[in-house]
Image (cartoon, rainbow, N blue to C red):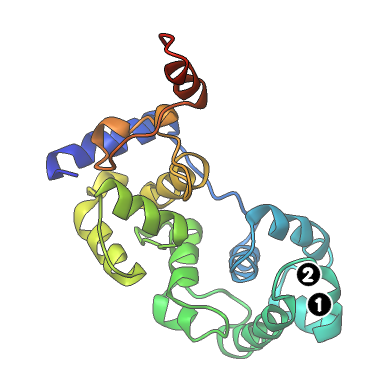
């Protein structure tokens, strides 16, 4: 993707979705942190189903600690890797209570000190919770950035650094959401839905895929 195409690329995404939001359900910085921690290798839908039961009972670090490990596990057992995630969340809550007065910190360094919180999780909390222009590179953003040519990289950190350099400031805060949604629903891994993609004109991916009906009609020798 040419540098001159980046602004129109994001302008199209912004026009289609001016106020993008995470699909994880939360009502506080701690709920966001907990939900993102639980979402590793799990779907947002699956996490939301669990937290709809957990958060009404325990939605602060101290309340999670009061549940105890087995109590916490009983609420999140439908989520993949729930045992290790429960241990991480409990340990993170202890640090939040003991070191931060139960408040989620707003710096990367402090967030990454919490068990179960890596760079990607910290970036999500900083971006979604605190409005910072960070780039949390998950599998969707990694794929979209490489496939479109927006920010090629061999690993998530390289892609993140490229995005921070190439995404114009006016799109920086919301670009994380737009790219995730693009990858989740349109620029899918096995078969990108190029015929539905609003930013296809700016994408380097070739050949563009066609709608299933169009492919069938061409095979029959009929016009689209």
Asked whether the beta carbons under mark 2 and mark 1 sit within 8 Å of each other, the answer is: yes
Q: Quadrant of residue 207?
A: top left
Residue visible at 60% across and 88% down in the picture: 95
Q: Is residue 94 left or right of residue 165?
A: right
Q: Is residue 34 left or right of residue 134?
A: right
Where residue 79 appears, as percent x and y from the top left, is 73, 67
Task: Decide if residue 4 is in sight here.
Answer: yes
Residue visible at 64% across and 64% down in the picture: 35
The relative height of residue 45 versus residue 185 in the rendered view (above or below) is below
- Taking the view exactly as shown, the residue that stands out farthest to the top is 223
Q: Quadrant of residue 92?
A: bottom right
Q: Is residue 74 left or right of residue 99?
A: right
Q: Quadrant of the C terminus?
A: top left
Residue visible at 49% across and 86% down in the picture: 113
Name the secondary structure under disc 1. helix
Q: Mark 1 = which residue?
A: 73
Q: Mark 2 = which residue?
A: 76
- Taking the view exactly as shown, the residue that stands out farthest to the front is 220
The relative height of residue 51 versus residue 17 in the rendered view (above or below) is below
Q: Quadrant of the N terminus?
A: top left
The relative height of residue 120 versus residue 44 in the rendered view (above or below) is below
């Amino acid at each position: 993707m040419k540098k001159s195409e980046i602004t129109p690329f994001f302008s199209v995404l912004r026009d289609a979705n001016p106020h993008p939001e995470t699909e994880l359900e939360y009502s506080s910085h701690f709920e966001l942190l907990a939900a993102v921690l639980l979402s590793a290798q799990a779907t947002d839908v699956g996490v939301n189903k669990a937290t709809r039961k957990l958060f009404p009972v325990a939605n602060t670090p101290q309340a999670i600690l009061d549940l105890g490990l087995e109590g916490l596990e009983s609420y999140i057992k439908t989520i993949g890797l729930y045992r290790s995630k429960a241990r991480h969340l409990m340990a993170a809550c202890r640090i939040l209570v003991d070191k931060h007065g139960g408040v989620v910190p707003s710096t990367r360094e402090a967030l990454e000190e919490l068990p179960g919180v890596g760079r990607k999780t910290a970036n999500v909390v900083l971006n979604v919770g605190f409005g910072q222009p960070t780039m949390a590179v998950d599998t969707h953003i990694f794929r979209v950035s490489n496939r479109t040519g927006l920010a090629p990289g061999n690993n998530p950190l390289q892609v993140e650094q490229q995005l921070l350099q190439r995404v114009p400031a006016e799109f920086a805060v919301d670009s994380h959401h737009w790219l995730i949604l693009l990858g989740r629903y349109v620029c899918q891994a096995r078969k990108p839905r190029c015929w539905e993609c609003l930013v296809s004109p700016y994408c380097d991916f070739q050949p563009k895929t066609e709608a299933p009906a169009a492919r069938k009609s061409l095979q029959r020798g009929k016009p689209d």
